[in-house]
Amino acid sequence: MKYIYHVSLIALVSIVLFASCKEVAPPIDMTVPVANLIDSTFLNPSPAAAQPRIALVEEFTGLKCPNCPEGHVIVSDYSAANPGRLSIVRIVNYFADPHSLAKEDYMTAQGDNIYAKLGSSLAWPCAAKDRILHGTETDIVNISKAQWDTYLDARLATPTQVNLNLTSNYDLGTRQVIVSVEAEYTGAVTDDNFLSIMITEGGITDVQDNTMGTIQNYNHEHMLRDMLTPTSGVSLNAEPKVAGRTYIKEFAYTVPAAYDPDNMEIVAFVHKDGSEFDVMQSAHIDLN
């Protein structure tokens, strides 16, 4: 019996050691994915006519930036004079922000990444207009406020080679929005293209410094809140981009409780990414 005892003990130890060395499976993700989101491409035999260009304006700004309200006015006035022709995103990244008197910190990791990608500026306010070099500028993000209107005039007169259409379906109960993007090429494009989608919020009342001091109840519009894609975008390169090549992609986003969906916009744009970042076309719609 003693011999049997030892064998049983060895067997028991072996089982324990085997169990302890057994590969542990990764934890199971029980999150229920959003079902039936469309991600497709096809060739339209009857391509649509090219849309008028809608330029993307990315303003880099800050609540502690005393000169930034001047930039806000320039872009807002231009937009009012050219209804629907600008997609505006204000990215808070001023070096002195966040503001000690502000209700929250409006800086975002995505905004910092975009600023680093496009290149730094000598001062604020600064802005990128369709992420290209304008005139004699040496920086995509430039501070030449007096020239912004001229640069935008030239950009809006430039034909596009891709049409961009957006729809938004917001569920009040779940606070989830389904964003559908259709990108249809109206001509041949050989460069790699990508799709980026931003979420902005307006109607935010908070402090803002200006050259006279601090405005206590400044109305902040078009502030970048989030992105539905990486800052580099998602690829539109599965098939050759010829007239009629169409991509349809859907994205889901749950609006945080602190954000007001009635004051939010979806901004989408097709662009290059790499050594050049040119925006081919942009579009914007209300989230709700």
Image (cartoon, rainbow, N blue to C red):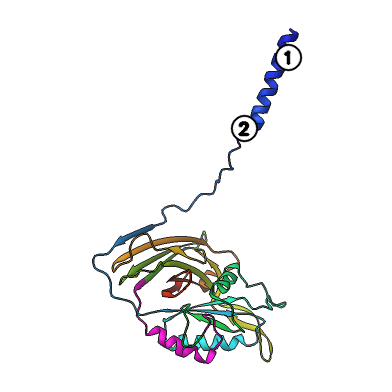
> What residue would you read off at disc 1?
6
Q: Which image quadrant is residue 64 in? A: bottom right
Q: Is residue 50 left or right of residue 107?
A: left
Q: Position of residue 44 (x, y in %)?
A: 27, 64
Q: Where is residue 137 in the image (x, y as percent from the top left)?
A: 51, 86
Q: In which quarter of the image is the N terminus?
A: top right
Identify the residue shown where x is 33% and y is 68%: 184
Front residue (pair 163, 79) = 163
Q: Which residue lies furthest to the left in this view?
A: 45
Q: Where is residue 285 in the image (x, y as percent from the top left)?
A: 44, 73
Identify the residue shown where x is 60% and y is 86%: 69
> Residue 183, which numbered label?
none
Regarding mark 1 in the picture, which secondary structure is present there?
helix
Mark earlier in primary sequence (2, 1): 1
Front residue (pair 277, 225) = 277
Q: Position of residue 131 (x, y in %)?
A: 48, 77
189 relative to 143, above or below: above
> What residue would you read off at disc 2?
22
16 relative to 237, above or below: above
Highlighted range, magenta: 138-163
User: Magenta span has 141?
Assistant: yes
Kind of residue sitting beneath label 1? His
Q: Is residue 208 left or right of residue 195?
A: right
User: Magenta span has 192?
Assistant: no
Other residues around mark 1 within 10 Å, as few (<14) / some (14–19) / many (≥20): few
Regarding mark 2 in the picture, which secondary structure is present there?
loop
**Disc 2 to disc 1, C-alpha distance:** 24 Å
Kind of residue sitting beneath label 2? Lys
Front residue (pair 224, 136) = 136
